[in-house]
Amino acid sequence: MKNPILSIIIPCLNEEDSIPYTVSSLLNILKELEQTNQIDSNSFIFFVNDGSNDKTWELIQKFNKETNGKIKGIKFSRNFGNQKAIIAGLFEADKYNADCFITVDADLQQDENKIREFIEKYKNGAKIVCGIRNDRKTDGIIKKITALTFYKFMNILGVNIQINHSDYRLVSREVVQTLKNFPETNLFLRGIFNELGYKKDYVYFDVKPRKYGKTKFSFFQLYSLALNGITSFSLVPLRMVTVVGFIMALMSFCLGISAIIDYYVFHSTVSGWATIIVAIGFICGIQILCLGIIAEYLGQLFQEVKSRPRYIIEEEIN
Ligand code: UDP
Ligand code: MG
């Protein structure tokens, strides 16, 4: 088997502080892997500038010149979000005949020294190698709890995602070709790679604290990523709406029967409005919650029906 051409894909949003360190670190790793005959010397790094408004793109251009094209990249016309940046990276880097692709964050919080292990597993036949975090020491308490709840909830809903799965992963060219057949605008990558099948393997890694800059994810972005994951992979919440509705209807029916019995048999008077108010409030709450769940799916459908382009590339350097 000839040595694979490796493409390292890096989504970036305002990462001017991290990029110089990331570039030098990854170039060293590529050099070592090339010298030890693990990968082809045409391997390259591919940046996706996801609408940064700092010097990120200028830096990518500068490194492109200095390395004679070993560092390539594209620039989005605006911010499209990290998932779209990763997809764009995979699809666009595919033009340069890469055999396998590793996606990693620009801050290199994910241990870049594990790249060797990813390549080994790929050479042993895995088409998808998923990076799994050993722990969540570097996350704040709220992120820890919400992330864990999300993974547990997804598993309950029947979506099989490994806990602490990350977007640090290797995929083969074949997998990228297959991914091109999934036209949905809102791709939740951690879910989709599970759906594809293919031989999988795992690499366990430690997450380091961020060296430069701050996290680029707001709470709202994480929330919408999680919701996207749920609504694009599970119909269970919709079914739950039906079940809840049915139970509520049954309860109201029983309540009605007991009221009639009270009136005709026991001649007891209505026991005050508090109970009624509570019951009405409760039922209204459930109804609005159910409407909310349906609206989430409707929103998902709305976006998919429009089938707008996932991203817009404004500039490209190779
Ligand atoms: N990122 C991106 N677009 C966004 C948000 C983030 O391309 O809208 C990139 C970011 O530059 C980084 C990666 O996604 O390379 C992960 O972001 P970050 O390190 O801020 O997330 P955290 O590690 O805090 O979860
Ligand atoms: Mg990070």
Image (cartoon, grey):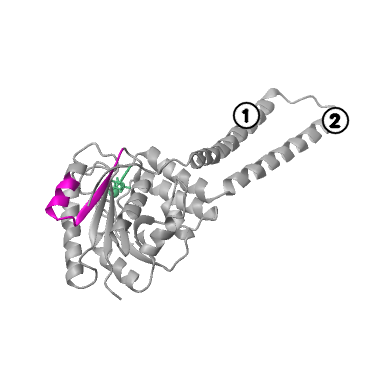
Image position of 309 with respect to 264: above or below: below
- Label 2: element kind: helix
Would you place residue 132 above or below residue 145 in this image? below
The mark found on residue 195 in the picture is: none
- Image spot of residue 51 (x, y percent): 29, 39
Residue 129 appears in the rendering = no
How packed mark 1 is, by other alpha carbons closer than 10 Å (few <14, some 14-19, many 20 or more), is: few
| Residue nearest the viewer, comparing 92 with 205 | 92
* Left or right for 163, reference 113: right
**Tag of residue 266:** 2
Q: Position of residue 107 (x, y in %)?
A: 24, 50
Q: Secondary structure at mark 1?
A: helix
Q: Nearer the viewer, residue 40 or 96?
A: 96
**Number of marks in the rendered image:** 2
User: Which quadrant is the N terminus positioned in?
Assistant: bottom left
From this view, report whether residue 280 is shown above or below residue 134.
above
Of badges 2 and 1, the one in the foreground is 1
Amino acid on which the number 2 mark rests in the picture: Phe
Residue at mark 1: 281
Question: Residue 312: x and y, percent?
Answer: 34, 41
